[in-house]
Amino acid sequence: MNTELRLHGQINDKIEYFATAAGCRTSHHHFFQINDQNVRFFSAGNELCLDNTSVIQDGTGGMFCEYMFGGEQPISDLSKEGVANRLMLLGAGYNDQGELQIKGQCQNQQNYTSVFLIGHAVDNYFFFINGLDGATPNIRQEQLLRYLGKTIKRIPHLNQQDDSQLAELLLAQLPEQCAVYLVRLSATKYRHFQQEFQTLYYRDRSISKTTDTILRNLVKQMRLNQAQCERIKTDVMYRHRDNYRIIDDYKKILIECYKQGNISQKQHARLTRLEALAMRSEIPISLLNALNEKLKTKITLSSQEPEHTAITRDIFSDLKLGNGIESQDIIQLLYAKQSARINHDHSFEQLLLETGQQIDEQIRVGKPVSLLEEFTYIISFFDRYDNTATNVSQIAFMENYRPTEDLIHSLIDSRHEFNLLAKGLFDKLLFHDIMASQFLGRFGRQKLVCLKAGLEEIAAGLTTPRRLTADLKIIDSDERNYAIILNHTKKRIRNRYSQYSSRVEQDELYNEVNHELTMRGKIHQSIDQELFNKVIHDIKTEAIYVSQLLPDIVSNNDIALRNDFFVNSGLDYFYIEELEREYYSQNLLKTEHLQQLRVGAI
């Protein structure tokens, strides 16, 4: 009959211990001694002493702990399936051939700072065994290694194990006459930090400014070591269920590459796909970088594909093997499609064509028709993306383009389908990149803001497609009127030397332009004063650029000044480039120089 004894105590306000003795004999019933200086655990031939500063051990056993993600871990352990824990036996070391040997003295002394720095930041286990029949300590250590080595190194979720269950697990691997003595050292303050960070991070799977402030205050208040806290944060982030699955897949491929010494094209495609998936899933890139540093290998690829092609090829490979398609795969394929479209990569379409032909061939030789159905499902999303992206681009960049209610209904349907895959996917695919484009003009941006808000309001039942088309029509009319007023005002200033510096001169110019355009039927109502003020502001800005800045930019090849004007002037990119073209033409300058200026090649 097995019996178990447990003892709990505190070394200081930072570290507490949990001792467990378990076995079928009565020899372990008296296994500890406490005095003012230390607590001592013992059995025949074994001793483990905890004093105020360090742990001292003599006999069999050693120390084990859970590996923290991103920490020091031998490649031999990292590359083995299922190895999750560090095991350090007394007297153990490696020979020149890299083989583990028990050859030293079976004793060790280690201060607590070193224990939690080299081992786990929160929990570390010390143990010894009584009842092994080896004649010497070294032989008994070798026996212990054979009995317990693989088990200890492969215990899953070690820090979540109950000490009693852990002792029972180890005892089950040993001869019947043995007893297990287990002492867990726990850093109480770091455990509190670990729990607080886990609660905050798991709530939103992100570290907000508020969370960061709370953690900083906690570190300062409890006087914790910042490096240890960073180890804990990295480990907690890794163990989130949405993170570790992707990271473990990434690690498995890196291990394969490490063993073979290079990365094949297929492996590169899978790694690229997982990196993109990690980024889309908001997994901290530091977690992947930790693995890259550990398992860095030389990439030998005859021709490296673009990332979007590699990801697509990998997903299609899984599809052809009959592994099916998940929503996350569709999302990655849509981002790949977006990248191919932005980069004008026509080879992407060729890959789709080849894949379709290969699937047709597979079906002809007996593969299930479901392969074609899944591929067609993917293509339907690609077609939807192409049509929607084209429509949004036309709204953004084409003057006098007025979307119909039917087109708005189509955009609503696409928004619904994309957002079923992932919340906010429609905006990320169709709005984010185009809104960041330097070529997007002032009115194009207004149209996109109006369109985005309108689609959201329609989905919420707050407006209608008819109202949205009317709002877009107003912006289109403003764009048309702006162009008319700008051109006519510039001509009047140039041909009639009209003044526009003072408020009185601007009012006079406004009346003249308004009257003339109305008489010619170019406009059908009085010019909006705010729109006219914008025209005057842009004319002044244009004059400063053409007469003052551009000559300096051309003579000094000042690309930085040019870029600064593009960013801060408020004038549209295409309009500024047209001003530059006219300047070069009027001053008989070489257009080759202008091209070099635009690409920053001067």
Image: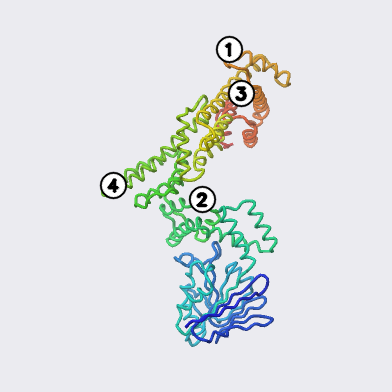
> On screen, 566 above or below 21?
above
Q: Earlier in the sequence, mark 1 or mark 3?
A: 1
Residue type pointed to by label 3: Asn
> On screen, 229 above or below 547?
below
Q: Mark 4 — residue? A: 363
Residue 281's tag is 2
Instruction: Give how far apart the Cα atoms at labels 3 and 2 are.
Output: 54 Å
Residue type pointed to by label 1: Arg
Instruction: Give how far apart the Cα atoms at labels 1 and 2 are.
Output: 58 Å
Q: Mark 1 — residue? A: 520
Q: Earlier in the sequence, mark 2 or mark 4?
A: 2
Q: Crowding at label 4, few (<14), some or many (≥20) Cα neighbours within 10 Å?
A: some
Q: Earlier in the sequence, mark 1 or mark 2?
A: 2
Q: Nearer the viewer, residue 392 or 257?
A: 392
Residue type pointed to by label 4: Ile
Across and down, in percent, residue 55 comes to 62, 77
Frontmost of labels 3 and 4 is: 4
Instruction: Give how far apart the Cα atoms at labels 2 and 4 are.
Output: 34 Å
